[in-house]
Structures are given as structure tokens and as C-alpha cells.
Image (cartoon, rainbow, N blue to C red):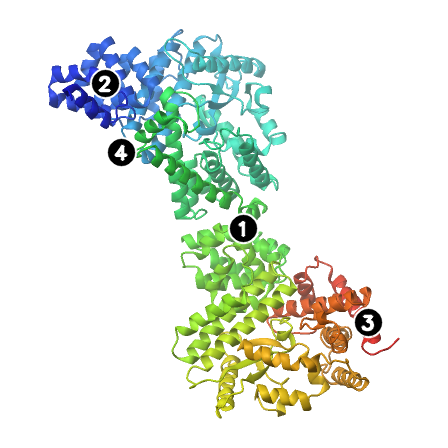
Amino acid sequence: MDRRATKAGQLARKGFAEPHQALAVIEPWFAEHGEEAARALLAPVIASADPDLALAALAHLADEHPDVFGAVRADPDRWRRLALVCGASAALGRHVCVHPDATEALAGPLEPADADALRGTLLTAVGADPDAPVPLAEAGRADDLRLAYRRALVRIAARDLDAEDPLETMPSVARELADLADATVEAALALARAETPGHEQVRLAVLAMGKTGARELNYVSDVDVIHVAEPALDAAGEPVVSSGEALALATKLAAGVARICSAHTGAGTIWQVDANLRPEGKNGPLVRSLASMATYYEKWAKNWEFQALLKARPMAGDRALGQEFVGLVAPHVWAVADDPAFVGESQAMRRRVIALIPAREADVEIKLGAGGLRDTEFTVQLLQLVHGRADDRLRVRGTFEGLEALVACGYVGREDGEQLSRAYRLQRVLEHRIQLFWLRRTHLMPADDPAALRRLARSTRHPDAAALLAAWRQSTRQVLRLHQRMFYSPLLEAVARIPSAAVRLTSESAQTRLRALGFNDTAAALRHIEALSTGFSRRAEIQRQLLPAMLGWFASGPNPDHGLLAFRQVSEELGDTAWYLRALRDEGAMAENLARVLATSRFAVDLLLRAPQTVQMLSGGSEPPRQFADILASMEAVARRHENPVDAIAAIRAVRREELLRVAMARILQTADLAAVGDALSAIMSATLDAALGVAARDIENPPRLALIAMGRWGGREVSYASDADAMVVVADSEDDEALAKANRIITRLRDWLRKPGADPALELDLDLRPEGKGGPMVRTLASYRAYYERWSSTWEAQALVRAAHGAGDRELSRALLGAIDVVRYPEAGLTRRQVTEIRKLKARMENERLPRGADPRRHVKLGPGGLSDVEWTIQLLQLEYAHAEPGLRTTRSMAALEVLEATGHLSQADAADLRTAWTLASRIRNAAMLLRGRASDTIPTDARELAALADLLGYPPGEVSTFTDDWARAARHARAVMDRVFWGLR
């Protein structure tokens, strides 16, 4: 292999795509300067984004301007910077070859240029005095402006490309580009004055908008502006011309600026000046007076126009006039979020932008695509405009400084802010590098161009194109996730719905607002608010953001005062934890859901305050109730961690408390209906007793097989929050003489441990439905049960067995006993006349004896006329009568049995509907009363406030309490009429 081929291979490994062409350029360097010096010259070329491109530009410069080439080569800093610029930008490489004096901008330290220095440089370039009150350029020097602009651009690009961390440097690069735009427009205006006789008779202010206004400009971007003009004033302060004449002059000046900046000549071009964000857009006058602006923005402007004005600032011309305009529109900008439609309009606008992206560009759009630059910018702006109404610290123009302010003030989490900032910086750097190559306005990732991707990867410090694309895709995923969470946040929408004055919780009208919201003790509410939000800690900052929305959400619940108190209690317990306030602020509907729970249910609040960390269950929305197997696995797992059985039971009860809270919250938030609640509470009861049985039998030698037969509502899987565990205990037949004693010991322990008062709700294992009731043995063998039911069982016991099902313990043993009692609860010939009479007598006695003294039967949803007892006894009577012939009636569930009775014609459709309506409403009332009060109740309250709260929880609109009571009265009356006919036999 010859020496030349070896060198070409080395160059290829160094990054040259055309190593032989490169070698032809480089070999003379080695010959002229020696190997060491030539390698030093080559190193910056190899380090550039595109070594071939850089080398070609340098070779061209050497051919066309050898003296400039020699001067640059002699300065290592200039050489390195020029190689980096030529390797990243074909456009700037060509420019320095045609205008080699631009290389002088690469000499010396490359610190960010001061805005005033840039202004002075460009005004001087066009022959204007930078210190003059109204700079006036020399006519015909527009090309000098273009060259000065390109020279400054070469300098900025060199600083950008030479940065050790492009992401870190990016904001200062964007700021300097915006300052360069300001200087350019100022110089273009000086040139336009030279072309406009009478220019001194008008004061023209050019206001920067968009990224220019934010001082976050791209390399190639339209410069968005708005023009405001007023007549100049004489020494006496009087206008020197009419308003119309001033506007005509100003329009000529504005048009001249646009023409100078957009024109293409041999000196190049600058960029388009875009005035389409002005009032009425393209259809409106190019320049308006302050009075005209005021009228437009007060009467006709749309919300998006105020959002755009967030970034408005004076950039050129009469700065005082420009600042007057900014002061004029600022109150409108920071009140735009008071419009109830604003947040929805902003969200719809973003969706519309994405929908309009051509399909072929959707996956490569850096700016407008999902997870792109616009998502970050829209998110920051929306948060600023909503929260900035009450927090002046957020009233900044730029996306970078806006995001920093949102993080510093607690509106965005530190980690989220860091992720969003880094992703935005990366995407902006990619946008800059892509635009820099040809100095063309584009936002598309060159995904199908390997050479462009390679160049892009090298210029952004990525090892290869694959790593670059992976980093970009990850950034879009991060932005999209954070954008969707913040931009569509229920908290943001709730705060936006609150008037600006009411967002400030410390205003004098706070008590009036609290009273209007429905708080009864406004003084106590203010104390809670003060305790939560006073101070300068991040915790207090976030609480001040949360509370305006939380107060509204508390007010939508039955008890706002209790909700706020509970929120303070939970916050004081959890406020210093890393996740709590962050989750409330950031996690979708968590804050609203928590507010609803706290303002609705003392039962849920009591459970929550015993272990406040369980509020995490709301972090992903309301969690559905868990299945029996999952609950049992959790209980058994925590029990195994404790050798002491008492501690193990305490751990099981803690899991039970958490599961009860989960079900309560699901019901309050309407993600679980009545049937789902009954199933879930029954599963919790079964899992608790299953796990506790295992603990109770731990130190029993050769413990017997035993099972709990669920009875009553547990057996029917219709458990309510306050239900006891009605059960019978069966022990397997065995030769162990101690089996019954061991079983009694296990059950006694079980009952004592679970009923023991403590931090977690007690569970009563009620064995009164066993054979012979309280007078019979607590535990029986399977053989004993069989013998008893074959010989001595009573009719009431047969009725109780209708709802018998496996509850806990040994399933095979339960199956054996349930099989044995089928003949009792599903008698082959149905009920005898005597048995029907017995059941009716027992029901009559219950109605006379069990209704609490002084209770209004019409308000008692369990034992009153048409209540649960009436419905269930009617259904059970029909099951005893017909289940032997109708297998579908062999169910422990009341509503399932009712469906079969209707389907088989044993009940008419109307009667079944009446029973179903009463049973469902009564069950819902009982559950709601428990949730609301935190204690069991079967009575509809008479207290007006409690009654209204109960109606609210049941879903009745405010003011519809009478509708609720009428609904119950009607349902109970109809159900009682069905019972009279079907159960009592009355016609």
C-alpha cells in the first residue's frame, strides 16, 4: 500500500468523507509548515462539524485571499473559530471567502457583545451617530448594514460553536441574536430616515414581539414587530404635524425598514420584518397611534393577541413611546386569563397547530411537533399568564427566564423544570445548527440525510447520528409528558376560573369570598389559610398556588369548613415530605380529588389522618378497589414481617384501613358504583379474616382445618362500611380430640384482636346466626352441622342460610357444609303454610321490637316501611319458596335473585322495579350517611344542613333536598305496597 493511500485512510478515520480531496489540500501544508505545525492547523478542521466543508472553505480563502489566510493561520484562536464556522455553515463559509474582512470579528475574546455596543457598531457602519437622539444614516449604505450584520453573525456563530457545552451557551446566544436584531432595526430605521423627508416630524417606536421580544431569537427567523407612532412635539410640547400626517410618515419609515432588512443584494440579506402581529394583522394599518392601539385592545382584541403581547418590548426608534405602549397593554395581558374561555382557547390553539402539520413532517418537526419547542413555550406562557395575575415575579418575557421564575416560585417542580429546560435547550440548539448551515428558516430534523445528521451530531457533541436522534426523541417524550401534565392541568384551569382579585388570598375581600363560597366559619378558614400559606418557604409558595383552587373545590363538597381543616391537618403531617405538595401541584386531578374527599367524608378523613401518606392513592387519579387475592397477598405479606401476633394483626388492620379508604374515595369520586362497593367491602372483610386466621393459628400445634361461613350482607357480598362480619364457624371432622378446643381458641383470639379499639377500625365477628343462636356452641364440626340441620333447624335458620357463602378459611370445608345445607335453604317442596306463617310472625315482631325508640319509621331506611328489611325479606321468602325449582334463585345476592324472580314471572316487572329502586336507594343512603358522618346511621337526618350534605353526596343538585326526600318517600311507599301483596298476602 503506498504512503498516500495510508494518509487518506487516516484522514477518513479522522472524519473526512472525501479523504483524497482533503489530502490534496493538506499535503502542501505539511510541505510548507512541517508536520507539527500542519497537524496543529488540521486539528480544528477535524474538530469541526464537517471537516470536508471546513477544509474546502479554508482552501478557497487561501486561493482568493492568501494574505487574509496567512493572517488567520498565524492566530490560533482565529483559525480554530474560522474552521468551526466554516464546518458548520456553508453560508457563512462562502461569506467569509467573498468578504474576508469578516474574519477580523473572530479575533480576541469572544464574550457576549453588549446590546449598546452592537447598536453602536451597526449605526456607525451606516454613518449614523450612535449618541444622537434620533440617529440619521448616510443614504445608500444599506449594504454596509448587511455586511456589518453578517460580520456580527459570524462572531456569534463562532462563540456558539466554540462553546464547551452548547446547551449552556444557548440562552446567551439567543439573547445576543435578539440584541443584534435590535441594532439592525435601529440602523435600518436610520437609513429609512435618510430616505424620508420630514422624518423628524414623527416619533416612531418599533416594538419587538415573539422570540425577538423575548430576547431568544434564532439565527434565521422573521423578526416580529409592531409599530406605534405619534407626532413629534415642538418646544412648547405641541404636535408639529397632525396625527394623520405623522402616521403617513411613520408608515414610510416602517416600510423602509422592512425593505432594507429583507432585500437581497451582493452583500447578502438579513431577514424578513414581520408586522402581522399588529392589530387586525395583514388587513390593519402598518402603524397606529397610541389612542388607536388603546381602542383596539380594549374593544376588539382576541385573547391570543394579548398572549402575544406578553413578549412585547421596545427595540428601536422612540424607546419612551414604545415603553408607553407596553404600559398601555400590560394590564390587558395580565388580565387575559380572567376570561373563562382563555385556557380552553389556548389548549385548542395548540391542538390546532399540531393538526395542521403536514403528515410527512410531523415526525421531524422540531418546533411545532408534539413534544417540540412550541409545547414548552405554550406551557410556560400559559402558566405565567394564569399565575402571573397575582404574582408579579412571573411577569417576564422569555421562555428561559419564565421557566426559571416558575421553578423558583414553586409553580413548577425543580426536577420537572430542569428536564423541561434541558430538553428545550437541546431542541433550540438543534434548530440553530440546522438553520446555521444554509442560513435558512427551517425547523425540520434532516432524518433522511445521513450527511446532515452526521454534521449535526458532531456540532452538538453527540458521538454519532443514532445518539443524536435518541437524545432528541427522548427530549420530545419528556416535553410532551410535562406539557400534557402542566398545560392540561385541572389545577391550572381551576385557578384560571378564579377572578384575579380573588387569587390573592390575603386581600381584604377574602372573608367575603369565603362566605360566598359557602364557608360557615370564615374566621377559622382564614386562620387555616394563614397557617398554610404564610412565609417564604417553597412549601408556603406552593400552598399559595394551591389554595385558591382548593377553596373552590372544597366549596363544591358538602362541608367546605371540614375540608379545609382536614387539608391543613394532612398538610401539616405531610408538608415537608418531598412528594406531597409536588404531587398536588403536578399530578393531574389529585388536588381536586383530595379536596372533594376531604370536604365530603368524615369517614375517609378519619382513615386518612391515621396514615396521611395514604393520600398517595390519589396521585394517579382515583384507584379502583383491589381484588380479594391482591388484598390477601398484601395482608399476609405484612403479617409475615412480625413475629409477635398482636403486631401482625395490627399490620393486617392497617392494610384493611387503607383498603377501606380506597373504596371510600372511589365511591366519593364516583368511580365505583353500589355493587362495586359491596363487592370491594366484602373482599376486604374476607381477606382480613383469612389473613387473621393464619396469625391466630400460628402457635397452635396441628391446628384444625376450619372455615368461616359468611352470613347476612357478607354472604350476599352486599357489605356496607359499618357492617359486622356475620358468620358461622365450622371445623373439619378429625380424630383429634382437641380440635374443637383449638378452634375455639383460634376464634376467640381472632375476635378479640379484631374488635380491639385502636388506631384502625375494629371488625366485629358476629356469630349470632349460628345454630341455636347465642345459646349454641361457637364452633361446630361439619358432622355436627349436618346433624343439626337434618333434625332441629328452625325456619328462621333456613331463611338465614339463604345468604350463606364461603367467607374465609378452608374453601373445601366451606363447600362441604354449603352442600349439606342446600336441602335446608332450598326445600324441595318449597315452604309449608306453617313456615310462611312463622316467617311472617318473625317479621312482625322485628318491626315492633327492633325499630329504635323515638325513630320515625318513614325516615328509617332499614327497618321502616319499604326499607331494606322489607325488600330483603320479600326476596328471601320467594327464594325459599321457589329456589328448589329455579336454580337461578340459588344466589346469596339480593339483586341477582330479584332479576331471576322477575325473569321467571314470580314478580311482575313493575314490582321488581319498585323493590330494586327502594333497595338501591336505601343502600346508597346508608353508605352515604357513613361516609358523611363517620358513623353508621340508618336514618335520614332531620337537620337541614346534614340533610343537604347527604343529598349532595347522593348526587342531587344544590337546592334539591326536597326532591331527595320525596324520592325516598315514593320508593319506600311503592316497595311497601309490593311487600304487602307478595309477603303478607294482602290484596
Q: Which residue is mark 3?
A: 978
Which label lies toward us, 4 or 1? 4
The N terminus - image quarter: top left
Pointer 3 or 4: first along the chain: 4
Q: Secondary structure at mark 3?
A: helix
The local secondary structure at tag 2 comes to helix
Q: Which residue is mark 4?
A: 164
Q: Dividing the picture into quarters, in which one does residue 877 lie?
A: bottom right
Residue identified by numbered label 2:
20
Judged from the image, the secondary structure of the residue bearing numbered disc 4 is loop
Front residue of 209 and 900: 900
Q: Are marks 4 and 2 in contact (CB under 8 Å)?
A: no
Cα gap from disc 3 to disc 2, whole angstroms:
101 Å
* Residue type of the residue flagged with mark 1: Ser
- Disc 1 to disc 2, how far (Cα)? 76 Å
Q: Which mark is residue 507?
A: 1
Q: Nearer the viewer, mark 3 or mark 4?
A: 3
Question: How many angstroms separate mark 3 from mark 1 (CA)?
Answer: 59 Å
Q: In the rendered view, tell whether residue 420 sits above or below residue 532.
A: above
Under mark 2, the amino acid is His
Q: Is residue 229 visible?
A: yes
Amino acid on which the number 4 mark rests in the picture: Glu
Q: Closer to the N terminus: mark 3 or mark 2?
A: 2
Q: Nearer the observer, disc 4 or disc 2?
A: 2
Given this view, does label 3 or label 1 mark the residue nearer the observer? 3
Q: Are marks 3 and 1 in contact (CB under 8 Å)?
A: no
Front residue of 350/138: it is: 350
C-alpha span from label 4 to label 2? 31 Å
Dividing the picture into quadrants, the one containing residue 141 is top left
- Relative depth, front residue between 534 and 282: 282
